[in-house]
Image (cartoon, rainbow, N blue to C red):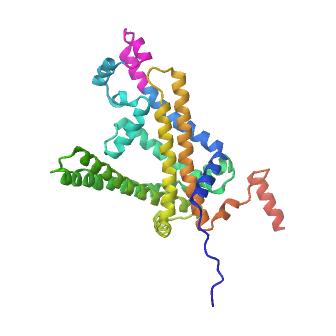
Amino acid sequence: MPSSAKPPVKTAVLGAFLEGWRRVLAAPALTASILVVTLATALSLGTVLGGMIGDHLGSSLAAEPVAWNWNEGWAAEFAAQAQGLGRTFTHEIIGFGGTLKILSGILDNQPLNPTLAGAAIAYGMLWMFLTGGILDRLARGRPVRAAGFFAACGGYFGRMLRIGVVMLAAYWALFKYLHPFLLTRVYDHYTRNMTSERDGLVLRVALYLAFALVLFILNMVFDYAKVRLVVEDRRSAIGALGASMRFLRRRPLRAFGLYLLNGIAFLMLLRLWLEAAPQAWESVAWAFFVTEIYLLVRIWLRLVFVASEVVFFQGELAHAGYTARPPHVWPNSAAAEAIRNLTEQR
């Protein structure tokens, strides 16, 4: 007897991407909060670095020219005596160079400045705390207010922390063993007798792409593990990781297609940033304005990345009912809810 069950409907990749944008743009308070947190982190580091530069310049004659333009001689003098965060003040931080330096540092497995590493860890922990609330808000597709948002942040933080430990160990192993294997052993082996510099460059780019592909796959596994943890209210981080791998194994092309679509959007932003990034001689107000616009779009893209994965997962496993949970209505208080429950019981 043939089964009467309907075949599962496949979620359109472009539809998940567009619905992700809709949910993010419908949550301006979420975007604004993340922007404020990011600015606060950056400004704290900038204030420390500005104090170092001010102490070094003092009332010297070089102070005024340096304030308005990049001075290579003074920058070299400052770098020679700088410590900690001051060592990051190089010409590479200006405009698009800072973005390139970050990407190059990741691909070449360069160690972070200790002060920056500490700030990155603190920001990562803060983002890990917020992840549960962000996923919950985007999965519901409706306002949850501050109390509901932070309740979700706190409720999922322990589980996100356990996933974070596994994720940190996996990334450490990737950069500790796979990166040197590909970019040192394999590259040296095949270029030992190579006479063409062009062939060597092509091989290195291919090895970079191979490493990036493994990095992307690992990132997808952890992304969907977090999604399943929140949308399905799972307790086990290991169980969520296993469920994530099963989910990706059954639909690898569409899941990777969505990941690729989000990646293309990020590359388009980088292309625009290359044209619009402020230069050293431009006014401080203009540079600040352009940088904040870039930062805002970066935050949007990061949230859309998460939101599109949530939409894709909900559509594939019919978890859309999670977003349809009835919202609380005024008066939204525990006392009012207790009175209503008591009335219903009577």
Does the magenta segment cover residue 116? no
Name the quadrant containing residue 8.
bottom right
Query: Residues in magenta?
Result: 49-70
Q: Nearer the viewer, residue 236 or 90?
A: 90
Nearer-the-camera pick, 151 or 291: 291
Q: Position of residue 198 (x, y in %)?
A: 26, 45
Please say if 5 is above or below 47. Answer: below
Q: Quadrant of residue 232?
A: bottom right
Report the residue at 17% width, 47% height from top: 195
- In what quadrant of the picture does the N terminus appear? bottom right
Q: Is residue 322 left or right of residue 187?
A: right
Q: Residue at x 18, y 54 (%)?
A: 189
- From where the camera sits, is residue 99 visible? yes
Q: Position of residue 222 (x, y in %)?
A: 46, 58
Residue 132 visible, this orientation? no
Task: Examine the residues drawn in magenta and state their main secondary structure.
Answer: helix
Q: Position of residue 14 (x, y in %)?
A: 58, 56
- Quarter of the image for the C terminus: give it: bottom right
Q: Nearer the viewer, residue 324 or 265?
A: 265
Per the image, is 56 magenta? Answer: yes
Q: How many marks?
A: 0
Point out residue 149 in the picture as x, y percentages from the top left corner.
63, 50
Q: Is residue 209 left or right of residue 249?
A: left
The structure residue drawn at horizontal position 34% and vertical position 41%, both measured from the top left corner, is 105
